[in-house]
Amino acid sequence: MSFFTLQVKIGLQIKARLEYVSKLNIQDEAYLWVFKAKCTNCGEVTKHMDFTRFDEEALSGGRGHAMLHYKCKLCSRENHMSLLPLTLQPYYGIESENFKTIAEFDCRGLELVDFIPTKGWRVEVENSHKKFDDVDLAETEWMDYDDCAKVSVGVYELEHHFVKIP
């Protein structure tokens, strides 16, 4: 049995149908990332785990730090992951209905299986200076009205998947 875990970079891709939205992105660095993950050693799936970019947990044996560190309940293997902060990307209106990588994660010993979006998104309105902050995408759809531009604004049919980054 190996005592090290292979580093895997995983990209989170989203796709949504946008209505009068020029840009959709994580509002700030304190966003609460919530995932379900599978231990690559035994296949056990977590209920959910969460972290922010500012979380820092020491790894056992002085092997560094990670934003999220957990011990698998089934096989006791220690797994961890971190957001690669310089990889955060907005999702633009022009990309509506196409998958795009919006963040990358360094995953060791785990495979991401689900992303649970929470509040903390920013929606910028097309042809307007209006921004909606702290938008909650937990229901995978959101809508509001821009009084200045006199248009309905919406994020619909939010989907996601994960891709391995070479």
Image (cartoon, rainbow, N blue to C red):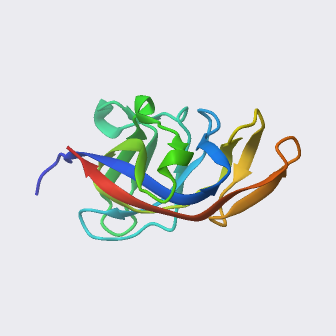
Q: Where residue 110 appears, x then y in whole percent?
A: 32, 56
Residue at point 70% right, 38% down?
Answer: 127
Nearest the viewer among 103 and 16 is 16
In the rendered structure, the answer to whether residue 58 lies left or right of residue 10 reads right
| Quarter occupied by the C terminus | top left
Nearest the viewer among 79 and 34 is 34
Relative to 17, residue 42 above or below: below
Q: Where residue 45 appears, x then y in whole percent?
A: 40, 69
| Quarter occupied by the N terminus | bottom left
Q: Where residue 77 appears, x then y in whole percent?
A: 30, 57
Q: Where residue 94 appears, x then y in whole percent?
A: 51, 46
Q: What is the quadrant of residue 85 in the picture? A: top left
Nearest the viewer among 73 and 164 is 164
Residue at point 26% right, 69% down?
Answer: 42
Residue at point 65% right, 37% down?
Answer: 27
Relative to 33, residue 142 above or below: below
In the rendered structure, the answer to whether residue 96 lies left or right of residue 108 reads right
Nearest the viewer among 43 and 145 is 145
